[in-house]
Amino acid sequence: MIEAAYFYNKLSEFGIGFFSGVPDSLLKDFCAYITDNAQKQNHIIAVNEGSAVALACGYHIATGKIPLVYMQNSGIGNAVNPLLSLSDAEVYRIPMVLVIGWRGEPGVHDEPQHIKQGKVTCSLLDAMGIPFTVLEKNKEGADRQIELCFNTIAKTGSPYAFIIQKETFTPYCLQKNENIDAAMTREEAIKEIAAMRDGIIVSTTGMISRELYELREKQTPPNHERDFLTVGSMGHASSIALSIALQKPELNVTCLDGDGAALMHMGALAAIGTQKPRKFCHIILNNGAHDSVGGQPTIAPGIDLPAIARACGYINVHQADTKETLQKILAEKNDNLTFIEVKVKKGARKDLGRPKSTPVENKTALMNYINKVV
Ligand SMILES: Cc1ncc(C[n+]2csc(CCOP(=O)(O)OP(=O)(O)O)c2C)c(N)n1
C-alpha cells in the first residue's frame, strides 16, 4: 500500500495543484488528504463527475496547468460527454490526470451494482482513447507510473488515467470533519418515515438504502416489497420515483434522497416540480456530506434546499431538524406534491449490513406489490 500523502506529493512535484471530483470509497483516504491539504479554491468537490471534468478544463484554460479529477468508476458515465467532446485531443485537447476508483474489479468481491461497471472500466477507457495504468501499491512502481503519466500527457496534451484498486492507499483520517447541527441520526429519520408513509419508497444510493433495507429486515416477517433501492445510478432515485408516481397516481410514492445525490442531478427537482404528481413526497436527508464514501462535505449546507424546491414548483415545502417536527409534517394529510428537507447527523452504525436479496428479486417483489395495490 502507499500513503495518500505520498501520491499527492508526487503529483504535486509534477505540477498538480488543482483537484476536483466526486468522492469514492476506494479513494476515501486520497480524497480526505486532498480536502485537508489543498487550498480551498483549488479543491472543488463537484456535484457530478462531468462537472468535475469541466471544472478541470476551466482551470487549465485559466492557468495552463494540469488539473486532477477523481471519481468512482460509476462516475465515468457522467464524465463521458465532457471527456469526449471537450478535453479530448480531437476537440480542445486539455490535459488532466484522472484518478478512478475500481469498484467491481473482476475477481474482487463487490456489490451487484458494481459488477458490470468493474468489468468494463478498462475497455471504456480504451474505447475513449484515454491511456491508463493500474496504480501499483508500492512507491517504486508508483513513481515509475507517475513519470510515465506525465511523459504521456506531454506528448498527447490530453487526459491520462490511474485506476485505483481496493486497498491501494493506507488509511488517512479526514481532519476537516465538519458536522451539521442536527438532533436525529439518518437511521432514526428513516425509521419515522418508513413507519408513517404508506405506499412505496424509492431510496437513494449508499447507506440510505442499506439502512432502509435493515429496517424492513427487522420486521416479522422481513418484508422489502414496498421499496426500490437505487443501489447504483446515484442521483436518479427521484426520477425513478417521479415516473412511477405519474403512472400510478393512486399510489403514495416517497423518494428518500441524499443531499449529495440530489445535488448530482438537481434538474430532477425541476422536472418533479413541473409535473406536480400528487401523493408524491420527496425527502432529502441532509447530513451535509457524502457519508457513504468517507464523509467528505457536500455544498448542501450552504444552499437553501426548500427555496429551490419551492422555486421548482413543489407545493408543500417543509424543513425538519427534530423527530417531533418530522412526525408532525408526516402526519399532515395533504396529497399535494411535498418536499421535506430533514437535517440529520453524519455517521452510521458500524455493523450496518447490505441487501441479501438481488436487485432483480427486489424489483420483482416491488412490481408485484404495485400490481396488487393499484
Ligand atoms: C455516479 C456516482 N458517483 C459516485 C458514487 C459513489 N457514491 C456512492 S454513495 C455516495 C455519497 C452519497 O451522498 P449522499 O447522497 O449525500 O448520501 P449519504 O451517503 O450522505 O447518506 C457516493 C459519492 C456513485 N455511486 N455513483
Image: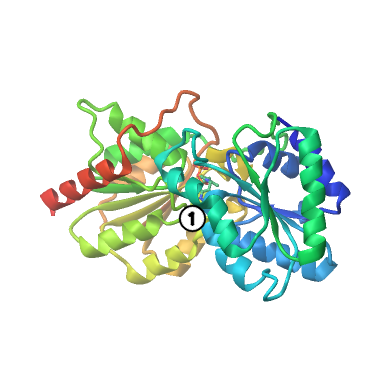
> Horizontal and vertical percent for residue 32?
69, 39
Between residues 291 and 169, which one lies in front from this camera angle? 169
Crowd around label 1: few <14 · some 14–19 · many ≥20 (10 Å): many
Residue 110, compared with residue 342, is above or below; it is: above
Specify the amino acid type for callout 1: Ala
Quarter of the picture containing the C terminus is bottom left
Disc 1 residue lies near ligand 1 with CB under 8 A: yes
Q: How many marks?
A: 1
> Horizontal and vertical percent for residue 96?
73, 60
Residue ID at (48%, 58%): 306
Residue ID at (25%, 52%): 333
Q: Which residue is labeled 1 in the image?
A: 262
> Horizontal and vertical percent for residue 150?
81, 55
Res. 66 in view: no
Residue 354 location, quadrant: top left
Residue ID at (49%, 41%): 104
